[in-house]
Amino acid sequence: MNPLALQLNESIQASSNHVYDMLSKLGKELYYPKEGILSQSAEASSRAKKYNATIGIATENGKPMHLQVIQEKLSAYKPQDLYPYAPPAGKPALRDAWRKKMLEETPSLQGKSFGNPVATNALTHGLSIVADLFVDEGDAVIYPDKNWENYELTFGVRRQGRLINYPLFNENNQFNSAGLKEALLAQKDQGKAIVVLNFPNNPTGYTPGAEEGKEIVAAVKEAADAGINVVVVTDDAYFGLFFEDSLHESLFGSLTNIHPRILPIKVDGATKEEFVWGFRVGFITYGHESADVLSALEQKTLGIIRATISSGPHPSQTFVLDALNSPEFSEQKQEKFLIMKARANKVKALLDSGKYSGAWDYYPFNSGYFMCLKLTKVSAEELRAHLLNEYGIGTIAIGEHDLRIAFSSLEEEQLEDLFDLIYQAVQDLIQE
């Protein structure tokens, strides 16, 4: 094992054997090189006053070399904020701005110890980092039965985790904290579990209420009290799009610093929150009382980034930072939030109107981009194919009975026609 990896491991062990035991074999072997090209280039950037012949970019007249056909489209930005490599951890000013945003939006983080966000190539990359750092073959990875299908690839196929699902909803159509607790406590003999919490939930668009949130935290803490090391990932992809009376902050705040056997990890980003899907700017943030543990985890994270993508895209990090610092940012974001909320409210009003009685039920939704129909008379895949082939309507079939509708991608005035046509398609299939 590389001496730098050993040093990081020793630093983690000195502060928390529990976190060290959470690491995968790969996680224990990871490190960020101190004597490689990047570190030598960083040293040269501050000390090479005459010539700097280190980093592999081209310069011209003291600026990054660039093509005018590109720069003329981006003339509002300086070449040095676009063309050079971004640091592997992300632009420092962007990391600071995102941390400030986290503290404002999740007040329960105030006064708690957590790391500086590390920039990722959007949220999937952040989840992949979690998988690499903490999941070995056979490790329990726990998340609800209503989930984003990419979890299976990320935690199961890539890392051979043992995927454990529990029903998202209980008999009262609330979050099934009892199911989460049962799945967690079943790992007592193994002594380790990775939990993924995704709110607003994809595909249902559900976010728990305050009491449900307390139950989730209590379930995780009970597992930790039972001697289980728990890595808790809050996949906050749709954070902030809360349209009703639900949790309005990330559970990362409530989980941080509550137990030495709990390591909360927040994965979030500008992707959905700021409506910049193609920018691919995300973040991963660790919560722990020990500064040494936080530093070592950051170094291991940078090791993964260096070994996979090297660093994230500089232009989009600059664009996001510029937006966060703009005085118009909050007002413009609120405008888009209200549009999304109106669409969600319109969908709920349509579904509660009674005009589609008998064709389906629907899962609770109060946030995010989606809602999910629970079909009662036809299969989801059969309906999806019929809608596409006969009506030119695209939806997502999930399992036998669930049909996901992305109301985010339709105008409010189009929604009634959409559901009328889905209802008609159901009638078509019933009558066949």
Image (cartoon, rainbow, N blue to C red):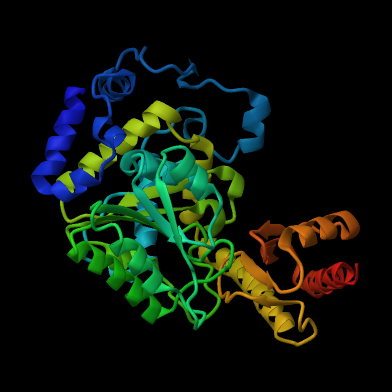
Q: Residue at x 28, y 19 (%)?
A: 40
Residue 23 visible in this rendered orientation of the protein = yes
Could you say which is closer to the camera, residue 398 or residue 121?
398
Label count reads 0
- Is 63 above or below relative to 410? above
User: Can you say which quadrant of the picture contains the C terminus?
Assistant: bottom right
Q: Position of residue 193 (x, y in %)?
A: 31, 54
Q: Position of residue 412 (x, y in %)?
A: 75, 72
User: Can you say which quadrant of the picture contains the N terminus?
Assistant: top left
Q: Residue at x 14, y 31 (%)?
A: 7
Q: Residue at x 36, y 63 (%)?
A: 183
Q: Position of residue 409 (x, y in %)?
A: 71, 60
Residue 347 as seen in the image, left or right of residue 1:
right
Could you say which is closer to the camera, residue 107 or residue 420?
420
- Is 285 above or below relative to 3? below
Q: Residue at x 38, y 28 (%)?
A: 306
User: On the image, which quarter does residue 364 sit in?
Assistant: bottom right
Residue 377 as seen in the image, left or right of residue 125:
right
User: On the image, which quarter does residue 417 sit in?
Assistant: bottom right
Extreme-bottom residue of the structure: 354
Could you say which is closer to the camera, residue 81 or residue 112?
112
Residue 121 visible in this rendered orientation of the protein = no
- Is 306 above or below relative to 284? above
Q: Position of residue 323 (x, y in %)?
A: 52, 53
